[in-house]
Image (cartoon, helix red, strand yellow):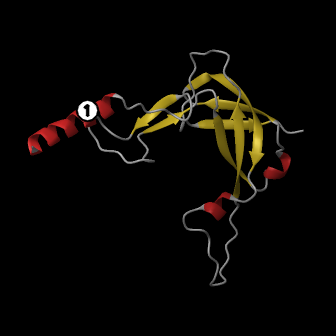
Amino acid sequence: AQEKTAAANITVVASHIRNTQIFAPLNGVIAKKWVSLGDVVQPGQAIFTIYDPDDVWVVANFEETKIRNIHENADVDISVDAYSDKVFKGHVDHIGAAAASQFSLIPPNNAAGNFTKVTQRVPVKIMVDPPENSLVILRPGMSVEVRVKVE
């Protein structure tokens, strides 16, 4: 009786596995696979890291002394090390409300009263316009240099 129950359970589980479908929350490219065939996963566990190659942006950290010249929607030229012969276009989407150091794992603490002035950096999100050549693929983590056009 136990053998028949176990065999029936195996049949049910095998049917569930065959009928299981996993849907991504967006169309995109798999950048990282976190699990392997046969791994047991839990609800909510990440199994892939996916990015949308049509929604590319850069976060550039500008010195606080230069941030006053940068405005939202300003045009930006973007140079990518991987494509040294091309200049990509973009625009400033958002200027951070605080210096990047305020969100670091160990924020600055001046409880002792000692102070050394260090130029802070403010994060600026720059949206990259789609490249004219569809063979050019910008990937997360690539090194870039940006030039914001100021007025």
- Front-most of 123 and 26? 26
Amino acid residing under circle 1: Ala
Quarter of the image with the C terminus is top right
x then y, percent, for residue 12 = 26, 35
- The structure residue drawn at horizontal position 68% and vertical position 23%, both measured from the top left corner, is 130
Q: Is residue 22 left or right of residue 147?
A: left
Q: Secondary structure at mark 1?
A: helix
* As drawn, 118 above or below 140: below
Residue on which the image places disc 1: 14
x then y, percent, for residue 58 = 65, 39
- Front-most of 39 and 88? 39
- Name the residue furthest right: 151
Count of picture labels: 1
Mark 1 nearby-residue class (10 Å; few <14, some 14–19, many ≥20): few
- Name the residue furthest bottom: 112
* As drawn, 93 above or below 104: above
Q: Is residue 111 left or right of residue 1?
A: right
x then y, percent, for residue 107 = 60, 68
Quarter of the image with the N terminus is top left
Q: Is residue 87 left or right of residue 7?
A: right
x then y, percent, for residue 2 = 10, 45
Q: Is residue 45 left or right of residue 116?
A: left
